[in-house]
Image (spheres, rainbow, N blue to C red):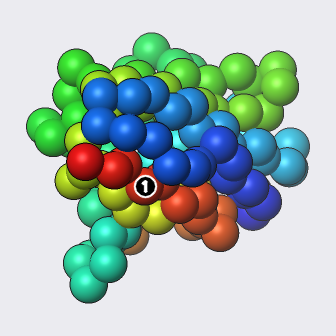
Amino acid sequence: QVQLVESGGGLVQTGGSLRLSCAASGRTFSRAAMGWFRQAPRKGREFVAAISWSGVVTDYADSVKGRFTCSRDNAKNTVDLQMNSLKPEDTAVYYCAASMGYSHTWAPRTLQDYDSWGQGTQVTVSS
């Protein structure tokens, strides 16, 4: 399994930016698809973005497409989520997750496809 720790959350005004980072430990990170999910109060956990282990495939939820960018550095065992033009509805706890064992284009959207999860980082966007 991969151990994951998120950082970079905080409070930002509408229209602002934040960069989340997820640090991974474990030798298998470079072969893990990585995903970002979020959970707002009283709501289920939802898909935000994913990136294949090769980095050649990225996928985004429609609600964040064009505003968020997911990237990874396999040499540093990190995956980042750059969030621009933030809106109050982006307020949530953000989680990174790892999905092992598939092709270099694997970048799933489904929670059940992910094996390891971080503890989450709070993002609050004020109006």
Question: How far across and how far down the image is residue 30, in percent?
Answer: 72, 32
Q: Is residue 125 above or below residue 1?
A: above
Q: Position of residue 40 (x, y in %)?
A: 32, 70
Q: Residue at x 36, y 68 (%)?
A: 39
Question: Where is residue 67 shown, x and y percent of the image?
Answer: 28, 24
Query: In the displayed structure, would residue 26 be above or below residue 86?
Result: below
Q: Quadrant of residue 5?
A: bottom right
Question: Which amino acid lies under the numbered mark 1 shown in the image of this protein?
Answer: Thr
Q: Is residue 89 left or right of residue 10?
A: left
The residue pinned by badge 1 equals: 124
The residue lying toward the viewer, choosing from 56 and 91, is 91
Q: Is residue 43 visible?
A: yes
| Residue at the outermost bottom position | 42
**Quadrant of res 119:** bottom right
Tell me residue 2's x, y (percent).
75, 57
Instruction: Please give left or right for residue 48 compared with residue 115 in the image.
Output: left
Seen from the viewer's position, the closer of residues 90 and 15 is 15
Which quadrant would residue 29 be assigned to in this image? top right
Depth check, front residue: 114 or 19: 19
**Residue at 82 percent of width and 20 percent of height:** 75
Which residue is drawn at the image coordinates 36% and 49% (left, top)? 125
Residue most toward the top? 56
- Mark 1 secondary-structure assignment: strand
Q: Is residue 103 visible?
A: no
Q: How many marks?
A: 1
Question: Which residue shows up at 32% across the image and 78% down it?
Answer: 41
Decide if residue 82 is on the left or right side of residue 7: left
Q: Residue furthest left?
A: 62
Q: Residues within 10 Å of mark 1 (few under 14, many from 20)?
A: many
